[in-house]
Image (cartoon, helix red, strand yellow):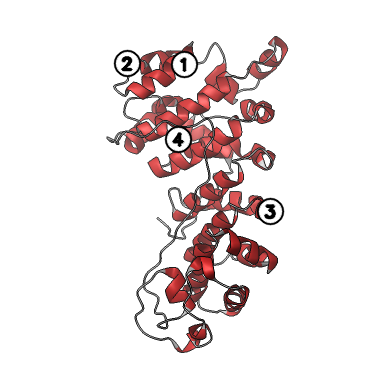
């Protein structure tokens, strides 16, 4: 994970859905993805709570006693000549940094020509951004657009650390007003990055935190097809993170019209299987439970039935195979999954 390779756009949904729509063609791929034995997970809430990302990165030599050495939590190898300025900063833990420390880091970030240094500065800022006082100070220093400016950086490790820093900054409600401007870039990173890469995972973590409340969920209403398509081709870690976003969106009744009209691959039904990880399956059932709570009028339902491959036809319509899949899941060996399925069917 984390390589910078570029794959054809997931955004080319007609091509992607053409590949994954056929249940037969997809089943072999699905078995490779989810035919593993996974450990049991805890009960999933109706919406997902925020994630704080703590990053580490090796192979960077730091000046003993420097801010980077202290905040990043890395072993100090030896002094670097270009770390002279930061080496004078007093020993501080991340939640005790002063304004001028963060200002120096942002300045060094903007002037560095070395990808490894840029990555390290972003890592340090991201770790510092786990604390409220630093979240506020970085915003006041106009650090959010500076950090977001590295989302298109040529080096994939720099893009990953920029996402991680924005993810921690996004824990602050005031910061979300600034970070929401970069949602299109974050979605593009998901589309353009290799499937199962650190870039996709970091982008999904950021979208999870941004979608915890309903204030900015409307920014993701056009991304449901992308998320559903990613769900059927990714590994467990990506599936869990993708479902966290979908659960958040589906917990908002105002988002439901957009969700049910989105194109959905028919192969998503293949995930309702005993071989699917419980961590994935529980969140998938939570998503379905949120969908089932939506009650369209007869007229709306008829209109949706005329939309080929929309999520309503794939998962909610009477003609969908979903009901049969859920009945089969009543015999799942995981008791928590049985309870969740029974709740949806009643």
Q: Are marks 3 and 4 in contact (CB under 8 Å)?
A: no
Q: Nearer the viewer, mark 3 or mark 4?
A: 3
Residue found at the very far right of the displayed protein: 299
Q: Camera-side residue: 8 or 288? A: 288
Q: Camera-side residue: 161 or 339? A: 339
Question: What separation in Å lies between label 1 and label 4 (alpha carbons)?
Answer: 24 Å
Q: Residue at x 69, y 29 (%)?
A: 254
Label of residue 300 in the image: none
Q: Camera-side residue: 25 or 216? A: 216
Q: Nearer the viewer, mark 3 or mark 1?
A: 3
Left or right of 145 on screen, residue 47: left
Left or right of 325 on screen, residue 289: right
Dot 3 falls on a residue whose secondary structure is: helix
Dot 1 falls on a residue whose secondary structure is: helix
Question: What separation in Å lies between label 3 and label 1 (alpha carbons)?
Answer: 37 Å
Instruction: Tell me which numbered mark, 2 or 4, is placed earlier along the sequence.
Output: 4
Question: What separation in Å lies between label 3 and label 2 (alpha carbons)?
Answer: 46 Å
Left or right of 272 on screen, residue 261: right
Write down the residue under mark 3. Answer: 174
Q: Is residue 259 above or below residue 182?
A: above
Q: For label 1, count other residues whose C-alpha is less than 10 Å away and answer few (under 14), some (14-19) or many (20+).
A: few
Instruction: Tell me which numbered mark, 2 or 1, is placed earlier along the sequence.
Output: 2
Question: What separation in Å lies between label 2 and label 4 (alpha carbons)?
Answer: 23 Å
Write down the residue under mark 2. Answer: 331
Q: Residue at x 41, y 30 (%)?
A: 43
Write down the residue under mark 4. Answer: 232
Q: Are marks 2 and 1 in contact (CB under 8 Å)?
A: no
Write down the residue under mark 1. Answer: 343
Q: Nearer the viewer, mark 2 or mark 1?
A: 1
Q: Is residue 230 above or below residue 298?
A: below
Instruction: Decide if residue 15 is in sight here.
Output: no
């Amino acid at each position: 994970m984390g390589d910078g390779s570029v794959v054809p756009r997931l955004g080319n949904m007609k091509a992607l859905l053409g590949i994954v729509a056929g249940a037969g063609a997809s089943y072999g791929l699905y078995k490779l993805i989810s035919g593993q034995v996974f450990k049991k997970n805890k009960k999933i809430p109706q919406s997902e709570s925020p994630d704080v990302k703590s990053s580490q990165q090796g192979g960077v030599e730091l000046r003993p006693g420097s801010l980077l050495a202290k905040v990043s939590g890395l072993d100090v190898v030896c002094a670097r000549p270009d770390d002279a300025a930061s080496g004078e900063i007093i020993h501080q833990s991340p939640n005790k940094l002063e304004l001028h420390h963060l200002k120096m880091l942002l300045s060094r970030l903007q002037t560095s020509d070395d990808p490894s240094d840029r990555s390290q500065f972003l890592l340090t800022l991201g770790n510092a951004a786990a604390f409220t006082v630093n979240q506020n100070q970085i915003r006041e220093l106009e650090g959010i657009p500076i950090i977001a400016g590295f989302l298109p950086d040529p080096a994939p490790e720099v893009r990953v650390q920029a996402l991680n820093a924005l993810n921690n900054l996004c824990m602050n409600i005031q910061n979300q007003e600034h970070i929401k401007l970069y949602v299109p870039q974050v979605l593009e990173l998901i589309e353009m990055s290799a499937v199962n890469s650190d870039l996709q995972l970091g982008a999904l973590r950021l979208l999870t935190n941004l979608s915890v409340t309903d204030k900015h969920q409307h920014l993701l209403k056009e991304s449901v097809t992308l998320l559903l398509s990613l769900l059927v081709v990714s590994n467990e870690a990506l599936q869990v993170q993708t479902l966290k976003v979908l659960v958040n969106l589906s917990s908002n009744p105002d988002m439901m019209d957009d969700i049910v009209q989105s194109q959905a691959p028919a192969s998503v039904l293949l995930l309702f299987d005993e071989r699917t990880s419980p961590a994935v399956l529980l969140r998938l059932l939570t998503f379905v439970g949120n969908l089932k709570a939506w009650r369209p009028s007869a007229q709306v339902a008829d209109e949706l039935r005329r939309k080929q491959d929309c999520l309503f036809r794939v998962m909610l319509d009477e003609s969908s195979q979903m009901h049969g899949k859920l009945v089969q899941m009543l015999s799942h060996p995981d008791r928590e999954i049985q309870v969740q399925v029974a709740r949806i069917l009643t």
